[in-house]
Amino acid sequence: MTEVPSIRLNNDTRMPQLGFGVFQVPPEETAQAVQHALQAGYRSLDTAAAYGNEAGVAEGIRAAGVSREELFITTKLWNSDHGYDAAQRAFDASLDKLATNYVDLYLIHWPVPEQDHYVATWQALEKIYADGRSRAIGVSNFHPKHLRRLVDESNTVPAVNQVELHPRLQQAELRSFHAEHNIATEAWSPLAQGGLLANETLTSLAAKYGKTSAQVVLRWHLQVGNVVIPKSVTPTRIAENFDVFDFELADDDMAAVAELDNGGRVGPDPDEMNVT
Protein backbone atom coordinates (compact mmCIF):
# COMPACT_ATOMS: atom_id res chain seq x y z
CA MET A 1 0.00 0.00 0.00
CA THR A 2 1.19 3.54 -0.79
CA GLU A 3 2.57 5.28 2.29
CA VAL A 4 1.19 8.79 2.65
CA PRO A 5 3.72 11.34 3.93
CA SER A 6 2.87 12.94 7.24
CA ILE A 7 3.61 16.27 8.87
CA ARG A 8 4.56 16.80 12.50
CA LEU A 9 2.12 19.11 14.25
CA ASN A 10 3.27 21.56 16.91
CA ASN A 11 2.48 19.08 19.70
CA ASP A 12 4.48 16.31 17.96
CA THR A 13 1.37 14.46 16.72
CA ARG A 14 1.85 13.22 13.16
CA MET A 15 -0.92 13.92 10.62
CA PRO A 16 -1.16 12.39 7.14
CA GLN A 17 -0.68 15.05 4.48
CA LEU A 18 -3.44 13.60 2.28
CA GLY A 19 -6.85 12.77 3.69
CA PHE A 20 -10.41 12.12 2.59
CA GLY A 21 -13.06 14.79 3.17
CA VAL A 22 -16.81 14.19 3.38
CA PHE A 23 -18.07 17.78 3.08
CA GLN A 24 -21.35 17.77 1.10
CA VAL A 25 -21.40 13.97 0.98
CA PRO A 26 -25.02 13.00 1.73
CA PRO A 27 -25.35 11.00 4.96
CA GLU A 28 -26.79 8.02 3.09
CA GLU A 29 -23.74 7.91 0.78
CA THR A 30 -21.07 8.58 3.39
CA ALA A 31 -20.46 5.03 4.63
CA GLN A 32 -19.83 3.67 1.16
CA ALA A 33 -17.61 6.61 0.20
CA VAL A 34 -15.53 6.20 3.37
CA GLN A 35 -15.26 2.47 2.78
CA HIS A 36 -13.99 3.07 -0.77
CA ALA A 37 -11.51 5.67 0.51
CA LEU A 38 -10.10 3.36 3.16
CA GLN A 39 -9.82 0.54 0.64
CA ALA A 40 -7.95 2.92 -1.69
CA GLY A 41 -5.40 3.61 1.04
CA TYR A 42 -6.58 6.77 2.81
CA ARG A 43 -6.14 6.72 6.58
CA SER A 44 -7.11 10.31 7.41
CA LEU A 45 -10.83 11.19 7.44
CA ASP A 46 -12.27 14.70 7.79
CA THR A 47 -15.87 15.31 8.85
CA ALA A 48 -17.82 17.83 10.94
CA ALA A 49 -20.92 18.00 13.09
CA ALA A 50 -22.49 20.33 10.52
CA TYR A 51 -22.10 17.79 7.72
CA GLY A 52 -24.59 15.47 9.40
CA ASN A 53 -22.57 12.41 8.40
CA GLU A 54 -20.36 11.56 11.39
CA ALA A 55 -22.37 8.37 11.96
CA GLY A 56 -21.85 7.47 8.30
CA VAL A 57 -18.10 7.87 8.74
CA ALA A 58 -18.24 5.40 11.65
CA GLU A 59 -20.28 2.97 9.56
CA GLY A 60 -17.79 3.18 6.70
CA ILE A 61 -14.89 2.49 9.07
CA ARG A 62 -16.66 -0.59 10.41
CA ALA A 63 -17.42 -1.83 6.89
CA ALA A 64 -13.80 -1.40 5.80
CA GLY A 65 -12.50 -3.25 8.84
CA VAL A 66 -9.67 -0.79 9.49
CA SER A 67 -8.54 -0.57 13.10
CA ARG A 68 -9.02 2.71 14.95
CA GLU A 69 -5.28 2.91 15.66
CA GLU A 70 -4.54 3.17 11.93
CA LEU A 71 -6.80 6.18 11.46
CA PHE A 72 -6.53 9.93 11.86
CA ILE A 73 -10.06 11.27 12.42
CA THR A 74 -10.90 14.97 12.34
CA THR A 75 -14.25 16.53 13.19
CA LYS A 76 -15.39 20.08 13.86
CA LEU A 77 -17.52 22.09 16.27
CA TRP A 78 -20.44 23.92 14.66
CA ASN A 79 -21.24 27.62 15.12
CA SER A 80 -24.31 27.07 17.32
CA ASP A 81 -22.17 25.26 19.90
CA HIS A 82 -19.71 28.04 20.72
CA GLY A 83 -19.06 28.69 24.39
CA TYR A 84 -17.23 26.63 27.00
CA ASP A 85 -20.00 24.31 28.17
CA ALA A 86 -21.79 24.01 24.83
CA ALA A 87 -18.55 23.06 23.08
CA GLN A 88 -17.90 20.21 25.49
CA ARG A 89 -21.44 18.87 25.03
CA ALA A 90 -21.07 19.08 21.25
CA PHE A 91 -17.79 17.21 21.40
CA ASP A 92 -19.41 14.40 23.39
CA ALA A 93 -22.17 14.17 20.77
CA SER A 94 -19.61 13.91 17.97
CA LEU A 95 -17.74 11.14 19.77
CA ASP A 96 -20.98 9.18 20.14
CA LYS A 97 -21.78 9.48 16.43
CA LEU A 98 -18.23 8.56 15.44
CA ALA A 99 -18.35 5.55 17.79
CA THR A 100 -14.94 6.36 19.26
CA ASN A 101 -13.65 7.56 22.60
CA TYR A 102 -11.23 10.07 21.07
CA VAL A 103 -10.53 11.96 17.86
CA ASP A 104 -7.15 12.83 16.44
CA LEU A 105 -8.00 16.45 15.66
CA TYR A 106 -10.89 18.64 16.84
CA LEU A 107 -11.45 22.00 15.16
CA ILE A 108 -13.59 25.09 15.71
CA HIS A 109 -15.38 25.20 12.35
CA TRP A 110 -15.68 29.02 12.03
CA PRO A 111 -14.76 31.93 14.31
CA VAL A 112 -18.32 33.42 14.10
CA PRO A 113 -17.06 36.93 14.91
CA GLU A 114 -20.54 38.35 15.63
CA GLN A 115 -20.84 36.01 18.62
CA ASP A 116 -17.26 36.65 19.75
CA HIS A 117 -17.20 33.43 21.78
CA TYR A 118 -14.36 31.71 20.00
CA VAL A 119 -11.81 32.34 22.77
CA ALA A 120 -14.05 30.70 25.40
CA THR A 121 -14.75 27.93 22.91
CA TRP A 122 -11.02 27.45 22.42
CA GLN A 123 -10.62 27.08 26.18
CA ALA A 124 -13.09 24.19 26.02
CA LEU A 125 -10.96 22.56 23.32
CA GLU A 126 -7.90 23.04 25.53
CA LYS A 127 -9.72 21.09 28.25
CA ILE A 128 -10.67 18.35 25.76
CA TYR A 129 -7.02 18.13 24.72
CA ALA A 130 -5.75 18.11 28.29
CA ASP A 131 -8.11 15.23 29.06
CA GLY A 132 -6.63 13.22 26.16
CA ARG A 133 -9.88 13.06 24.23
CA SER A 134 -8.42 14.75 21.18
CA ARG A 135 -4.81 14.15 20.22
CA ALA A 136 -4.57 17.67 18.78
CA ILE A 137 -6.80 20.74 18.54
CA GLY A 138 -7.07 23.47 15.96
CA VAL A 139 -9.36 25.78 14.06
CA SER A 140 -10.89 26.21 10.65
CA ASN A 141 -11.48 29.36 8.60
CA PHE A 142 -9.60 31.64 10.99
CA HIS A 143 -7.96 34.82 9.69
CA PRO A 144 -4.63 35.97 11.20
CA LYS A 145 -6.45 38.39 13.54
CA HIS A 146 -8.56 35.53 14.94
CA LEU A 147 -5.50 33.35 15.39
CA ARG A 148 -3.60 36.16 17.06
CA ARG A 149 -6.29 36.45 19.75
CA LEU A 150 -6.04 32.75 20.51
CA VAL A 151 -2.26 32.96 20.72
CA ASP A 152 -2.43 36.04 22.98
CA GLU A 153 -5.35 34.97 25.20
CA SER A 154 -4.78 31.24 25.69
CA ASN A 155 -2.06 28.76 26.54
CA THR A 156 -2.25 26.69 23.35
CA VAL A 157 -1.33 27.59 19.77
CA PRO A 158 -3.69 25.83 17.33
CA ALA A 159 -2.03 22.84 15.70
CA VAL A 160 -3.93 23.29 12.43
CA ASN A 161 -5.94 25.93 10.58
CA GLN A 162 -8.13 24.36 7.91
CA VAL A 163 -9.05 27.00 5.32
CA GLU A 164 -10.26 27.37 1.77
CA LEU A 165 -7.09 27.10 -0.28
CA HIS A 166 -6.50 26.26 -3.93
CA PRO A 167 -4.51 27.72 -6.85
CA ARG A 168 -6.95 30.62 -7.20
CA LEU A 169 -6.84 31.41 -3.45
CA GLN A 170 -3.35 30.63 -2.18
CA GLN A 171 -3.59 32.51 1.13
CA ALA A 172 0.04 33.73 1.20
CA GLU A 173 -0.41 36.09 4.15
CA LEU A 174 -2.21 33.45 6.20
CA ARG A 175 0.33 30.76 5.37
CA SER A 176 3.11 33.13 6.43
CA PHE A 177 1.39 33.63 9.80
CA HIS A 178 1.05 29.85 10.13
CA ALA A 179 4.74 29.34 9.43
CA GLU A 180 5.68 31.99 12.01
CA HIS A 181 3.60 30.26 14.71
CA ASN A 182 4.13 26.62 13.68
CA ILE A 183 0.49 26.09 12.65
CA ALA A 184 -0.13 23.52 9.92
CA THR A 185 -2.08 24.71 6.88
CA GLU A 186 -4.86 22.39 5.77
CA ALA A 187 -6.73 23.05 2.53
CA TRP A 188 -10.44 22.51 2.14
CA SER A 189 -11.92 22.80 -1.33
CA PRO A 190 -8.40 22.06 -2.65
CA LEU A 191 -9.75 21.77 -6.20
CA ALA A 192 -11.97 24.89 -5.91
CA GLN A 193 -14.96 22.54 -6.13
CA GLY A 194 -13.76 21.52 -9.58
CA GLY A 195 -14.05 25.06 -10.91
CA LEU A 196 -10.48 25.35 -12.19
CA LEU A 197 -9.84 21.89 -13.62
CA ALA A 198 -10.41 23.05 -17.19
CA ASN A 199 -7.84 25.82 -16.75
CA GLU A 200 -5.39 25.80 -19.67
CA THR A 201 -2.30 25.86 -17.45
CA LEU A 202 -3.51 22.85 -15.49
CA THR A 203 -4.65 20.85 -18.50
CA SER A 204 -1.28 21.48 -20.13
CA LEU A 205 0.55 20.26 -17.06
CA ALA A 206 -1.76 17.26 -16.83
CA ALA A 207 -0.82 16.30 -20.38
CA LYS A 208 2.89 16.80 -19.62
CA TYR A 209 2.85 14.47 -16.61
CA GLY A 210 0.28 11.99 -17.85
CA LYS A 211 -2.05 12.88 -14.99
CA THR A 212 -5.38 14.66 -14.56
CA SER A 213 -5.73 18.34 -13.70
CA ALA A 214 -7.00 17.31 -10.26
CA GLN A 215 -3.90 15.21 -9.65
CA VAL A 216 -1.69 18.12 -10.70
CA VAL A 217 -3.44 20.45 -8.24
CA LEU A 218 -3.24 17.93 -5.40
CA ARG A 219 0.46 17.42 -6.15
CA TRP A 220 0.95 21.20 -6.04
CA HIS A 221 -0.64 21.29 -2.58
CA LEU A 222 1.62 18.53 -1.30
CA GLN A 223 4.76 20.22 -2.61
CA VAL A 224 3.72 23.58 -1.15
CA GLY A 225 3.42 21.81 2.20
CA ASN A 226 -0.34 21.90 2.68
CA VAL A 227 -2.39 19.13 4.22
CA VAL A 228 -5.10 18.38 1.66
CA ILE A 229 -8.50 16.65 1.91
CA PRO A 230 -10.16 16.11 -1.49
CA LYS A 231 -13.67 14.64 -1.48
CA SER A 232 -15.58 12.51 -3.95
CA VAL A 233 -18.25 9.83 -3.88
CA THR A 234 -17.05 8.20 -7.12
CA PRO A 235 -14.76 5.20 -6.46
CA THR A 236 -12.56 5.85 -9.49
CA ARG A 237 -12.13 9.51 -8.53
CA ILE A 238 -11.43 8.61 -4.91
CA ALA A 239 -8.64 6.30 -6.06
CA GLU A 240 -7.38 8.81 -8.62
CA ASN A 241 -7.06 11.55 -5.99
CA PHE A 242 -4.89 9.20 -3.95
CA ASP A 243 -2.59 8.42 -6.89
CA VAL A 244 -0.36 11.49 -6.57
CA PHE A 245 2.84 10.09 -5.11
CA ASP A 246 4.54 8.79 -8.25
CA PHE A 247 5.40 12.16 -9.82
CA GLU A 248 6.72 15.57 -8.84
CA LEU A 249 6.09 18.98 -10.39
CA ALA A 250 9.19 20.80 -11.61
CA ASP A 251 9.99 24.20 -10.11
CA ASP A 252 8.86 26.10 -13.20
CA ASP A 253 5.57 24.19 -13.21
CA MET A 254 5.03 25.02 -9.54
CA ALA A 255 5.62 28.65 -10.46
CA ALA A 256 3.09 28.40 -13.30
CA VAL A 257 0.42 27.16 -10.87
CA ALA A 258 1.33 29.94 -8.42
CA GLU A 259 0.48 32.49 -11.12
CA LEU A 260 -3.18 31.36 -11.05
CA ASP A 261 -3.78 33.11 -7.73
CA ASN A 262 -6.47 35.78 -8.09
CA GLY A 263 -8.07 35.76 -4.63
CA GLY A 264 -11.19 34.01 -5.89
CA ARG A 265 -13.20 32.31 -3.15
CA VAL A 266 -15.79 29.59 -3.65
CA GLY A 267 -16.92 29.73 -0.01
CA PRO A 268 -17.82 32.51 2.43
CA ASP A 269 -15.37 34.95 3.96
CA PRO A 270 -14.84 34.01 7.64
CA ASP A 271 -15.51 37.63 8.67
CA GLU A 272 -19.00 37.32 7.20
CA MET A 273 -19.85 33.73 8.20
CA ASN A 274 -22.10 34.12 11.24
CA VAL A 275 -24.74 31.49 10.49
CA THR A 276 -25.70 29.37 13.48
Image (cartoon, rainbow, N blue to C red):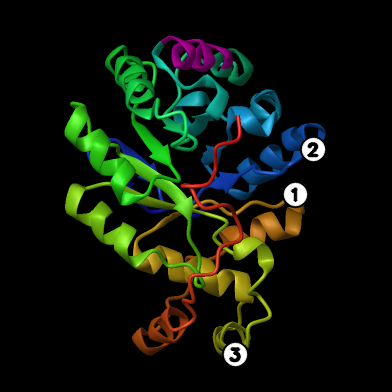
Alpha-carbon span between mark 3 and mark 1: 26 Å
Element type where label 2 sits in the image? helix
Residue contact between numbered discs 2 and 1, judged by CB atoms under 8 Å: yes
Label drawn at residue 61? none
Q: Residue at coordinates 65% horizontally, 75% vertically from top-left? A: 197
Label drawn at residue 204? 3
Q: Does residue 118 sit above or below 261 in this rendering? A: above
Which residue does the numbered mark 2 point to in the structure image? 29
Q: Is residue 12 visible?
A: no
Q: Residue at coordinates 77% horizontally, 54% vertically from top-left? A: 234
- Residue 250's spot in the image, x, y percent? 39, 84
- Residue 59's spot in the image, x, y percent? 70, 25
Q: Residue at coordinates 79% horizontally, 38% vertically from top-left? A: 29
Which residue does the numbered mark 1 point to in the structure image? 233
Alpha-carbon span between mark 2 and mark 3: 34 Å
Q: Does residue 256 sit above or below 68 in this rendering? A: below
